[in-house]
Amino acid sequence: MESAFEFPAGWEDLSPRSPLRLDPDLVRRYRDYRRREARALLPLLPREAIRPLYAAAREWAKGEGRRPEEDPLGVLADFAERLLPLPPFSHWLRDREAYLDAHLQEEFEVPAREGPPRAVPVEVQGFELAGRRWLAALHVLRKDGAWRGYIAFRPPEGGEEIRTGDIFREEDPREIRARFLSFQPATLQAFLRSALP
């Protein structure tokens, strides 16, 4: 499976059928992971450690051309992120591929960014329709207190994505994945036909 996106070094180690290869938000998800880890550290620090840490963070921010007084907590979190021994992208990517369900839970329970949640591709199946190869990628997200999922179709060589509406709703993303994996090629063909313009 070819990637349609440019990622930092490490993504080429993913298995060829990994759904992570279809995720255009993968780098943003890594940055959000780092931000979550830094923000989780701050409440654990003793009070007497905050003042000197913030003084160092202010100096660092000024050196970066930022105005720390505009967002003191953001500056502190950004500085703490640089201090933490967080894994590089390639290590995080291998962990995400091996333990995707744990990453999903964390990502949707403790969002690092404002704005609507963005779906995550979690599984891929290949099939043929009218002599043409297609990839069906299951995307899930947590919204309105439940896990929801849709299927996005595209040719293996890339091209425009065609997607269904939200067709899954479960309490656990693993249930959605199991249902998707139970689909036979004829079921995937029917979903693709229903989504074609």
Image (cartoon, rainbow, N blue to C red):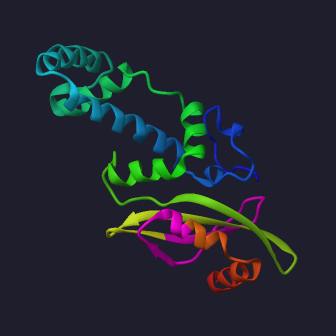
Asked if 144 appears above or below 37 in the picture, the reply is below
For this view, does 152 lie left or right of residue 13?
Answer: left
For this view, does 144 lie left or right of residue 67?
Answer: right
Q: Relative to the observer, which residue lies in front, 154 or 95?
A: 95
* Occupied quadrant, residue 179: bottom right
Q: Residue 111, how many percent across, how many down?
A: 34, 49
* Occupied quadrant, residue 85: top left
Q: Residue 62, how many percent across, how many down?
A: 25, 18
**Which segment is the magenta one?**
149-176
Q: Residue 29, how many percent across, how many down?
A: 47, 45
Q: Kindly give the residue lying farthest to the right in the view shown.
A: 131
Give yes or no for residue 189 being in the magenta stretch: no
Give yes or no for residue 167 being in the magenta stretch: yes
Q: Does any portion of residue 22 appear in the rendered image?
A: yes
Q: Residue 176, how many percent across, how many down?
A: 53, 69
Name the residue: 35% across, 27% down.
81
Q: Does any portion of residue 162 appear in the rendered image?
A: no
Asked if 59 appears above or below 89 in the picture, the reply is above
For this view, does 130 lie left or right of residue 135?
Answer: right
Name the residue: 64% across, 47% down.
5
Name the residue: 25% across, 33% down.
74
Name the residue: 40% across, 34% down.
34
Quadrant position of the C terminus in the picture: bottom right
